[in-house]
Amino acid sequence: MKKFIILAIALSMTAFAQANSSQVIDPYYEISDFSVEKVEEGDFFEGEYVLSRDTEIGDVIATAREIIAFGKEIYKIIEAGKPVINTNYAPISVLPLGTKYGQAITPMNLNNWQSPKFAKFKVTYKNGYGAEVVSFTYNVNMSYGGKFGDQGAYITNAQIVPENVNVLWGYTFNAKMSLVGLTNTGSDEDPVAGATLSLSYSVSTVIREDRNNMTIYIDGNGTIQQM
């Protein structure tokens, strides 16, 4: 009987301690604010662009009416607060479907590529004290405007490149990119390739985890737009 009473008291004290500890959370570990802003946009240089002949094409990852996407389904960008050095994957290319080259088509089979374009974004997380605990700046890069037989506007070398990441002690930050949609905003005869990219990121502490997604639309006319 005494053992039963002692056990009951111990369980009650443990439950009481857990209840109180769950109510008192250090604001340092609490995410109170999250924001995304575009900080810059432009071309790397002006004029028509000549693609490098060693441009990688990657695997077929999606197809839609008149267009086909090559690359990789998911790209890790930040892992445990550090940029992932992706030297062995192909950026995303969205090219014409049903050509004489079939799925062997490459960006080099197209012409009129425009100068690579970029848009720079900054993701910020703040804690309960208003301190910036995670700061992540990245570029969305691509070459656009490629034509096949003087028709269409296509995309190549589309990727999200980390520029700067700062993560305070006690926080873990991860980010990855994936292609989630293809569209043709032109006609069957003169397609304008469009792609929707998803950038997913998570911030975690010993207490909790926060997940967010940002959707970015790009197209063969040079559009880079946060949705």
Image (cartoon, rainbow, N blue to C red):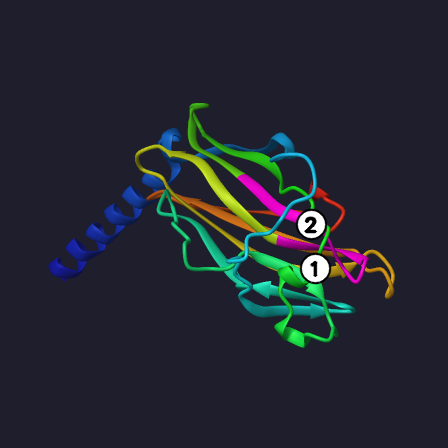
Return the x and y of residue 226 as percentages of the image width and height. Answer: 67, 41
The residue located at (12%, 58%) in the rendering is: 2
Relative depth, front residue between 141 and 123: 141
Return the x and y of residue 70 as percentages of the image width and height. Answer: 60, 65
Relative depth, front residue between 60 and 151: 151
Magenta-span inclusion, residue 143: yes
Q: Which mark is residue 74?
A: none
The answer to whether marks 2 and 1 mark residues whose Cβ atoms lie closer than 8 Å is: yes
- The local crowd at label 1, few if under 14, some if 14 to 19, many if 20 or more residues have their Cα within 10 Å, is many
The residue located at (74%, 73%) in the rendering is: 99
Magenta-span inclusion, residue 224: no
Circle 2 sits in a helix, a strand or a loop, which is it?
loop
- Residue 154 lies left or right of residue 107; in this view the side is right
The residue located at (70%, 38%) in the rendering is: 47
Above-or-below relation of 147 to 63: above
Q: Name the residue under label 2.
A: 113
Circle 1 sits in a helix, a strand or a loop, which is it?
loop
Residue type at numbered disc 1: Leu
Q: Residue 110 carries which label?
A: 1
Return the x and y of residue 179 as percentages of the image width and height. Answer: 60, 59
The residue located at (22%, 55%) in the rendering is: 8
- Residue 16 lies left or right of residue 109; in this view the side is left
Q: State which region is magenta.
A: 139-156
Q: Distance between the residues labelled 2 and 1?
A: 8 Å
Give the quadrant of residue 225.
top right
Which quadrant would the N terminus be assigned to in this image?
bottom left
